[in-house]
Image (tube, rainbow, N blue to C red):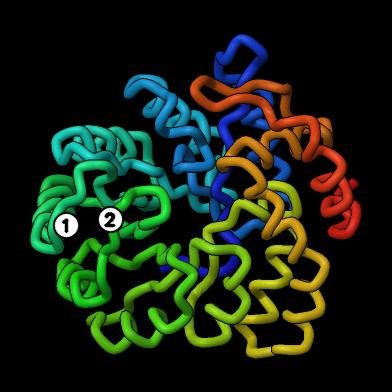
Amino acid sequence: MFQGSIVALVTPMSADGSVDQQSLRSLVDWHAEQGSDGIVAVGTTGESSTLDEAEHCEVIRLTIEFAAGRIPVIAGTGANSTTEAIRLTRCALDAGADACLLVTPYYNKPTQEGLYQHHRAVAEAVDIPQLLYNVPGRTACDMLPETVGRLSRIANIVGVKEATGDLQRVAQIRALAEGEFDIISGDDATAREFVLRGGQGVISVTANVAPAAMHALMAAALSGDRDKAAAIDSRLSCLHQELFLEANPIPVKWALAEMGRIPAGIRLPLTWFSEPFHDTLRNCMRQAGTL
């Protein structure tokens, strides 16, 4: 259902922390022009943890409105409360999202059975295509391939964003999943090899800064052109690493502000990117051709 470079879009904010709707519109337009294959609205990179529920739904609605059918929009609607995840997923359905991305419940460390029951409950409650999202480095919870396989049997669970960086999981999940099930990387640094091994694409932080290059990288990998994919990826490898010098989305919001695409706004407990790291990230941006 989804493939290529899907940007995990930042939520632009003014200096006072309010959502900057004009900058959001501009970013959506830019990604449509640059060839991004999809947008994730209000995922981790979109500061889902610092937006209240009404804001969360509004940013999803605005992103879909601004996209105007030019580019698919996947709404981040995960939560560590099943009832909250259902409410957010209903908001996304009502707004016209193409699909939803649901992170594993964070902090409360459910069992594998708990993960299964949680995602099944959301899928049964809201009739919209849903992607699972496994990112144990942020959630302290690892959804194992066996659980993904079980969930793939639910008709509207259509894929998984696998962000462990473990390339073995492509084959493991493919062997266990039923039907046409999308396996998408959530780790820019390993996304090229992930796709060459049979993944469909990446939900990318780097694509915020270098959307055209990430689109080209994924297109090359999907076509099996290892040499071309490696050449593109070599220019982006520094960004893949250094966009995580501090917690995402701190560095990527600073990078976009440096490019003049968003104002310098972020919400506590996140803080603006630390000055000692500025030159390091600037050098990566120059290497990638974005400055």
Residue at the image point whose x is 65% and y is 57% from the top = 36
Q: In the rendered image, which residue does mark 1 sit on?
A: 115
Q: Are the two marked residues, 1 and 2, in contact with CB atoms closer than 8 angstroms? A: yes
Dot 2 surroundings within 10 Å: few (below 14), some, or many (20 or more)? Answer: many
Locate residue 240, reporting x and y percent: 68, 59
1 sits to left or right of 181: right
* Numbered disc 1: secondary structure: helix
Residue at the far top in the pictured view: 16
130 sits to left or right of 5: left
Residue at the far front in the pictured view: 276
* Circle on res. 141: 2
Circle 1: residue type: Leu
Locate residue 167, reporting x and y percent: 47, 80
In the image, is residue 157 above or below residue 173? above
Residue at the image point whose x is 58% and y is 57% from the top = 204
Cα gap from disc 1 to disc 2, whole angstroms: 9 Å
Tell me, yes or no, if residue 100 can be seen here: no
Locate residue 184, reporting x and y percent: 46, 69
